[in-house]
């Protein structure tokens, strides 16, 4: 947060109007509340089923960091999951990377789960059949 505030201050210092009217950064809360989704939520079951049907293993677990889904859960009561490719230790770092095969597999999982969740594809139906 400090780095962001410093960047804003530096940018404002280079502009005449902003120098006279410096922006104030306000953070919505002092900390980020934790959030949890029940394993029985339909979206959780759908993603687990999709992974199984695509011949992949999936695991349920928690994160020790924040993701935008937590805001949906806490502020709006919308069940949200963190589902994605790659190794979390490389997320949002200077050396962030994701193997292309994992990115494609994740996109397939999201596509099939979305089709099933919206009733366009049936459980057990593969992506090529949807």
Image: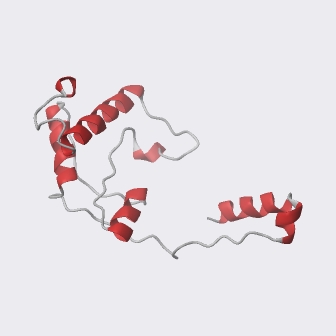
Q: Residue at x 31, y 56 (%)?
A: 80
Q: Position of residue 94 (x, y in %)?
A: 59, 42
Q: Quadrant of residue 1?
A: bottom right
Whether 113 is drawn above or below 73: the answer is above
Q: Position of residue 59 (x, y in %)?
A: 22, 47
- 79 left or right, relative to 39: right
Q: Quadrant of residue 130?
A: top left
How many labels, in total? 0
Q: Quadrant of residue 100?
A: top left
Q: Point out the residue furthest to the right here.
A: 16
Q: Position of residue 78 (x, y in %)?
A: 30, 62
Q: Point out the residue furthest to the top here.
A: 128
Q: Residue at x 79, y 57 (%)?
A: 11
Whether 81 is drawn above or below 21: the answer is above
Foreground residue among 110 and 57? 110
The color scheme shown is secondary structure
Q: Residue at x 38, y 32 (%)?
A: 103
- 117 left or right, relative to 68: left
Q: Confirm whether residue 111 shows in the render.
A: yes
Q: Confirm whether residue 67 shows in the render.
A: no
Q: Position of residue 107 (x, y in %)?
A: 34, 33
- 29 left or right, relative to 112: right
- 31 left or right, relative to 106: right
């Amino acid at each position: 947060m400090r780095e962001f505030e410093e960047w804003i201050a530096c940018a404002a210092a280079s502009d005449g109007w902003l120098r006279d009217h410096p922006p104030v950064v306000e953070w919505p809360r002092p900390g980020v509340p934790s959030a949890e989704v029940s394993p029985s939520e339909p979206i959780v079951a759908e993603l687990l089923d999709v992974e199984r049907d695509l011949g992949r293993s999936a695991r349920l677990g928690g994160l020790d960091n924040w993701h935008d889904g937590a805001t949906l859960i806490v502020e709006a009561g919308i069940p949200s999951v963190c589902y994605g490719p790659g190794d979390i230790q490389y997320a949002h770092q200077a050396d962030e990377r994701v193997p292309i095969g994992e990115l494609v597999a994740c996109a397939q999982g999201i596509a099939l789960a979305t089709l099933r969740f919206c009733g366009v594809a049936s459980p057990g139906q593969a992506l090529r059949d949807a």
